[in-house]
């Protein structure tokens, strides 16, 4: 699956093809020669190396960090002793992986990641189960998505299983940073950046893939806290033909100003709408689910927007859909991936059919929604005043964490050996 | 003008306001506390420092580089001896500017520029005139645009005149790198990146503004070379409510794959279309101009797309429009900023009304277009087989360079004293 997906998107990324593009275009415009000239090294047909975990070298830190008390953990602020790094060049492919002490990157100020946003990343977590084993959750999904993100911005693809193997070794080395307590985990951030140091706008001829790890506490330390959203139409996160379905750095910085504007009006996140119809797409940096009764049949429905190219292909989204199909449909629910509008949500509320709304993502797993500000009105989302989560959000969190922490043996849980 | 523009967009960026947002939201969701907690330093009302050129410190290199022979200059590949750097923090504002030897940046791997594309830049040039004076071209336009770009992604704004002053000092120090020959110049790359080292998605509490300089040759060393374009509708560069009018890194990486695909079919650049109507927006990394005779009146018209939020606000575009209004309209031309479609271009060609088409940008000044592939047909753009540029492209290049190199005294040319 991974290979199939990435190979179609990576079609233009093999360096031999890059070279043939160079040959095709070098006789014509000066502009293209400049943009592609850096790919001329190496001979066509040369074997390009994929990631090879057997070549891993490990340099351990001589100054191990103190562990922070769990209550002082802040998301993505403190990191473990080490990091995993892999360099790539267009002529050689993936160079031997290295685990080294956590350290600064030293990059020329002309490096393309600083100018043209050649960067993509993943968010995933490592958990300790009750027997002390380390577990990852569906890491193959993260590898497949990172390959798709990377290919979309002309960065290299790689063997996902090889990187999972290396991430396992890295996490095992730094396992003392994984908190034992339920709700805690080690957040992993695989990051892939273009490192070519020229200002010409073209495909990077070198890249760096690195993984850093930050111990994190539960998203809601004192239990669920339902959030309030501002339905946002003046700023548009993603569009057809764009890159909103990829986990690119480019999708994040433009969302901060609308987030600050929503916050200034008292809302925690933006609910990103799309088009004149006010289609519901995503919330903040999460996918969105709405549970409501069907207007005609009264059947309970769990709705989320389809993967039409404008929706991030969330691993939590996919997992919730699968669990709902397996465990809610037998109880009479209908699970739907379809476009739906803000008006449908408001109508369900007005007509007493609204059950609950929640966001879904790696950081919070699920994030219940209390209300949404839309066109000057406040749309309540099914919670009573003292209720912080609906039953489906609670159920999904329990099912997900049961699998993530290994209470329930499940193929999604990947045990690091 | 600069102040007016940037202040409206920078409304959410003053750190005192950021702090008030923190106060408003810190009592509600955990997510917001995490995102904004880094802004809690400093007291409200504290004076935030703008850029102060009088505090500049200069550390000269002890290993000056050799100058490259002009024919070996490649765009954005080689840099001068020094760089200009300014750090910013939310609590202190802009710290004293520094000119240092050109050197690597050392950044924590969690730095937000690597993850969320907190980055924007400018492209501008320094020229040597016939008397040996250094000249910049409309640097106030670059400063205004950098402020708008920065504000849009929650990075800091600054006093544009202060930065022009500093850029002047930097260029003067490295002036031996500005080639004397006509057509050559020193390309300047002001770059502004977020440097906060946490993975929380929020406004960066620290940033780095730096300027590097690369000596460059003429875009077309042997004279104009007309390019061929592929009209692109399957990938969409910009969208209303998006950030396509800002010079953000985020706008560049997603355009490389379509560029490679166009190149694989023999085209030099993408012509980015928009919407079902196939509106013409931009070409590659340039604005586009089309010169054609009006269907009804026969009057000569110079067309370019309006600044509707999806078009980069090019300095060259603005300059060509102004020159055309001043110097072509008296000769009977009509200059129009309006939406126009690919069909209008094709119709003009089919009906013998097409005069010429060219791109406009800092790197090439103007870039003549020979033909455009669109919906399976090839639309010729007014050039005869052996002609590499139309008369308007040639005239605009001559006028622009006359001003840029100081042959014609003009308010757009900024003399570095």
Image (cartoon, coloured by chain):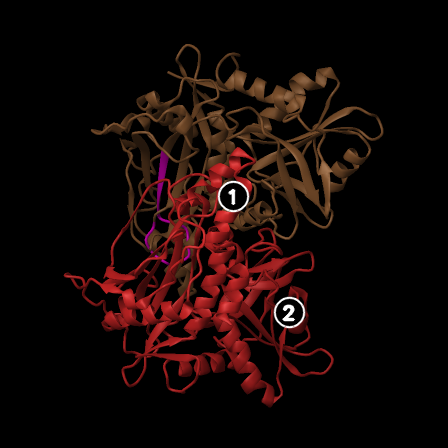
Chain colours: A brown, B red
In front: B286, or A264? A264
Q: Which residue is mark 2?
A: B345
- Local crowd size for mark 1, using a 10 Å CA cut-off: few (<14), some (14–19), many (≥20): some
- For the residues labelled 2 and 1, say whether their Cβ atoms are less than 8 Å apart: no
> Residue B376: horizontal and vertical position, in percent?
63, 58
**Residue B1 appears anywhere in the view:** yes
For image coordinates 44% across by 18% down, the residue present is A181
Instruction: Give the farthest residue toward the right.
Output: A296
Quarter of the image containing the C terminus of chain A? top left
Sequence-earlier tag: 2 or 1: 1
For image coordinates 73% across by 38% down, the residue present is A379
Instruction: Tell me the CA gap for discs 2 and 1.
Output: 55 Å
**Residue B225 appears anywhere in the view:** no
Q: Quadrant of residue A295?
A: top right
> Residue A70: horizontal and vertical position, in percent?
40, 24
SS majority, magenta: loop
For image coordinates 66% across by 25% down, the residue present is A387
- Both marks 2 and 1 on one chain: yes
> Residue B151: horizontal and vertical position, in percent?
49, 57
Question: Taking B173 as reference, is A348 above or below it?
Answer: above
| Chain label for disc 2 | B
The magenta region covers A196-211
In front: A120, or A48? A120
Q: Which residue is mark 1?
A: B23
């Amino acid at each position: 699956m991974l290979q199939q997906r990435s190979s179609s998107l990576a079609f233009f990324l093999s360096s031999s093809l890059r070279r043939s593009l160079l040959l095709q275009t070098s006789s014509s415009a000066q502009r293209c020669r400049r943009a592609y000239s850096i790919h001329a090294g190496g001979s066509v047909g040369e074997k390009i190396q994929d990631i090879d975990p057997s070549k891993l070298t490990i340099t351990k830190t001589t100054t191990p960090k103190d562990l922070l008390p769990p209550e002082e953990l802040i998301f993505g602020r403190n990191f473990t002793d080490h990091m995993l790094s892999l360099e790539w060049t267009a002529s050689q492919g993936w160079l031997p992986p290295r685990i080294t002490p956590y350290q600064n990157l030293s990059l020329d100020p002309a490096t393309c990641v600083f100018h043209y946003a050649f960067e993509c990343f993943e968010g995933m977590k490592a958990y300790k189960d009750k027997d002390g084993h380390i577990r990852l959750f569906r890491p193959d999904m993260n590898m497949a998505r990172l390959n798709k993100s990377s290919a979309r911005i002309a960065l290299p693809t790689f063997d996902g299983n090889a990187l999972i193997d290396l991430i396992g070794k890295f996490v095992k080395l730094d396992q003392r940073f994984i908190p034992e307590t339920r709700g805690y985990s080690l957040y992993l951030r695989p990051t892939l950046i273009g490192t070519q140091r020229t200002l010409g706008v073209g495909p990077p001829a070198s890249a760096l893939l690195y993984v850093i790890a930050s111990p994190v506490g539960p998203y809601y330390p004192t239990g669920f806290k339902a959030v309030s959203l501002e339905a946002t139409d003046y700023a548009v996160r993603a569009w057809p033909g764009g890159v909103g379905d990829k986990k690119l750095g480019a999708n994040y910085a433009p969302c901060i100003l609308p987030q600050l504007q929503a916050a200034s009006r008292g809302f925690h996140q933006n609910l990103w709408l799309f088009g004149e119809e006010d289609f519901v797409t995503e919330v903040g940096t999460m996918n969105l689910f709405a549970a409501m009764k069907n207007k005609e049949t009264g059947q309970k429905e769990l709705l989320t927007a389809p993967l039409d190219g404008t929706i991030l292909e969330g691993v939590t989204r996919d997992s919730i859909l699968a669990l709902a199909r397996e465990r809610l449909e037998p109880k009479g629910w209908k699970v739907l991936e379809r476009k739906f509008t803000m008006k449908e949500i408001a109508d369900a509320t007005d007509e007493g059919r609204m059950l609950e709304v929640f966001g879904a993502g790696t950081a919070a797993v699920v994030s219940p929604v209390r209300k949404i500000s839309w066109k000057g009105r406040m749309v309540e989302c099914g919670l009573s005043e003292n209720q912080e989560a609906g039953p489906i959000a609670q159920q999904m969190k329990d099912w997900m964490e049961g699998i993530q922490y290994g209470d329930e043996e499940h193929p999604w849980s990947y045990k690091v050996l």
